[in-house]
Amino acid sequence: MAGSAKSFLADAGYGEQELDANSALMELDKGLRSGKLGEQCEAVVRFPRLFQKYPFPILINSAFLKLADVFRVGNNFLRLCVLKVTQQSEKHLEKILNVDEFVKRVFSVIHSNDPVARAITLRMLGSMASIIPERKNAHHSIRQSLDSHDNVEVEAAIFAAANFSAQSKDFAAGICNKISEMIQGLATPVDLKLKLIPILQHMHHDASLASSSRQLLQQLVTSYPSTKMVIVTLHTFTLLAASSLVDIPKQIQLLLQYLKNDPRKAVKRLAVQDLKLLANKTPHTWSRENIQALCESALQTPYDSLKLGMLSVLSTLSGTIAIKQYFSSAPGTAASPAKSFDLVKLAQECCYHNNRGIAAHGVRILTNISSSCQDKDLLPLEQDAVFGLEALLVLCSQDDSPGAQATLKITLTCMVKLVKCRPHLSQSVVECLLTQLHSAQDTARILMCHCLAAIAMQLPVLADGILEDLMDLYKLIGQSATDKKQELLVSLATVIFVSSQKALSSEIKTVIKQQLENASNGWTAYRIARQASRMGNHDMARELYQSLLTQVASEHFYFWLNSLKEFSHAEQCLTGLQEDNYSSALSCIAEALKSYHKGIASLTAASTPLNPLSFQCGFVKLRIDLLQAFSQLICTCNSLKTSPPPAIATTIAMTSGNDLQRCGRISNQACMKHSMEEFRNLATRYADLYQSSFDADSATLRNVELQQQSCLLISHAIEALILDPESANFQEYSSNGTAHVESEYERRMMSVFNHVLEEVESLNRKYAPVSYLVSNTCLCNAVIALLKVPLSFQRYFFQKLQSTSIKLALSPSPRNPTEPIAVQNNQQLALKVEGVVQHGSKPGLFRKIQSVCLNVSSVLQSKSGQDYKIPIDNMTNEMEQRVEPHNDYFSTQFLLNFVILGTHNITVESSVIDSNGIVWKTGPKTTIFVKSLEDPYSQQVRLQQQQGQPPSQQQQQRTAYSRF
């Protein structure tokens, strides 16, 4: 169970306390001052780790200045170490505050008599090009060193020239002619020319520069026909076109020309690689003629390796807009059948090729055509795609080699894509997968199980007969002894959970538990339990969590598992709900709430300062509040039945002698209104949870969204049936039928939503006004229908695949967080906010940060001195700025007024905006205190006035001027 630490609980943070930033820097500085070369080198190479840990400018500036000193006075080996550190820490360079001083110390070495020292300095300058792009002394030194007689220095100058050309338009324009002369000069050796040519890829700053560079490259291609020169020149040509964008169609034609006419295999291979690069970058620039020419070359080539490369380009294009252009712009498309296209012929021919890679690209092209093109002529290709996929599946599932597994992954991905776009093909694809599952190798079986689960999540295609087959296979795997056994048990259990749409039978549970007892470790059992929780099989999950409680070594893990067990038990209590049986429903919800309260206590105990489990706690607390709201609604509906209708309420009150009888209906209506507001409040809280979950996967976010929609649905039903039937609007709540459903849980929830909406709408139109008895029954049945769908605990509840956090630093900042910063009330405070975006191992897996939104607000905490009438605008500060992080760093400033004397509380809150423009409230929130003090002159005037002395004429004049 120790392996589970990475997935949901971070390290508790026990053990030796780490040094703070200043102490760490002093420790390294001690190493730099050492007399031993080894200790100096060790101190230098530890700097990147320091930058990673404390990525703020004040430390990075000091550290780089110390490194520059080492570079200035050290030997060449130390200089080389400093160069490597600078290259590793390239994204921190812009945080250097004293750039002039840093460059001055480094640049002093350029005047050395040692060519190696000069070469290292040139490489150092090239690595710093992003922060000193327009330094003329650096430009001059690079130009001068290009004429050096030392090869090491010239190569370093070429490296620096390439880096400066990428950053500086002036340098690129100035060096272009020099590079051109050197390349065309007879005195320049060929190997040096090969190193100089790639500099031209950076000449894209304006159209004239790009055009002159293209002309030079065109001359080089024709003047120097040797293989190496052609390869380097063509590749530079491609990179230049990709950056300047305007010449991409010309470049595609040039590469296709070389692919067709040049007999050299190396040149053809380079042309294919560059075509792949352009296909990925700009597929929309490919014309039908380009794709046709590539198809003809692929059909004619006798080399499998080249055919594989060309098919790779075509399969990339087939998944983009280029494929629609290819079929739509053909002359006489309506008359020509699909099989007459060369692309289709090529794909059909390659589907059964003896080379697995070629066959994989062939079926991928057919799959993409079938998925994206809806023309009737192309419909027969569906069957070709299915047959090709089945053939590849049979071939690759018997082979354990890495190449076969890579091909199998492509095949299975194509199967999922084809079934998603063409649901009528699902049955044949699933049958083929299940047939092969028995005879396949274990590594292939794992991938095939993932594919089956992905298909079954989208479409309910696994029947009961198939379930028995899967159980037999599960027993067989449990008895085998292979290294992939644990992974296979998890994958197959997932397929079983997905295929059994309702609760698992006791027989299935017994089989799974037996195999786990016989053959698995605790981690496998935990992963299977986690999958059961995701698929809504809470009875199975509860039993597995229970069995694991005694197998963990940490109390945090124990409390985590105990909370999961309680949540599963709570959800299991809700599966016994029945329509029209409201008393049993109330008892089931009460039992579930009891388990949820136990679970949330355990979950709180499982959290640590480093990993507070905030999403999990927030999700569970909302679930508890939602169940309580449902319970309250059923109680309110039941109490409405006991209240007499308004028409006879007065008579009954007089007969019974109880005046409260005539008010019963009014009080219950007030309860209903309160209930509606509560559901709307819950929907708002679900929306807040959604906004705070920047790192969550799409399935988890969709789950939160469904919970929010269920709250809105019930509040709408209360309003439409009881509170305001006449003005009920059903248009905005009507579900979008065209939306693609990603999971069985979503499918069932959407079905309940649609059913409840239809029933409420029909009641609203049929019985206007709706009778209270009918409306109460409808509301209670809606609640029970929503609770009967087993809750799905999605991936983000257990596992964080993407991790993003923001660290803020404010200046000025007090030494002690509780003591305030002193500011005079007639001055403004310039608050500088710096921040660093920190990522986990997979940055930008689900969404990326486009910009950071900083909100600064101040609140007066305590007043000091007399009260003056001050405009409300001067009493508070509310400001917002958006900044785009560069190399994960951002900074901005705010000017704040503190006119009122006293202590002010400043709050800086950050939120992020992703590439789609959606705002996510990720935090953090930082607070500092400011004490606004009276300026000395105003204080002196006030004291004189209090003592009854009129201010002097000079002071009066100064007071008049001070207003301006």
Image (cartoon, helix red, strand yellow):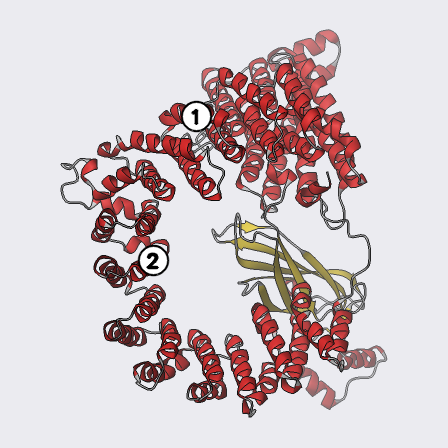
Camera sees residue 636: no
Does label 2 or label 1 sit earlier along the sequence? 2
Circle 2: element type: helix
Q: Amino acid at mark 2?
A: Leu
Q: Which residue is mark 2?
A: 278
Q: Position of residue 439 (x, y in %)?
A: 48, 26
Q: Position of residue 477 (x, y in %)?
A: 59, 26
Which residue is outermost to the right? 947
* Quadrant where the C terminus is found in the figure: bottom right
Q: Residue at x 33, y 69 (%)?
A: 228
The label shown at residue 430 is: 1
Near-viewer residue (563 or 482): 482
Q: Position of residue 586 (x, y in %)?
A: 70, 18
Report the side of 223 relative to 846 (left or right). left
Q: Amino acid at mark 1?
A: Val
Question: 953 above or below 819?
Answer: below
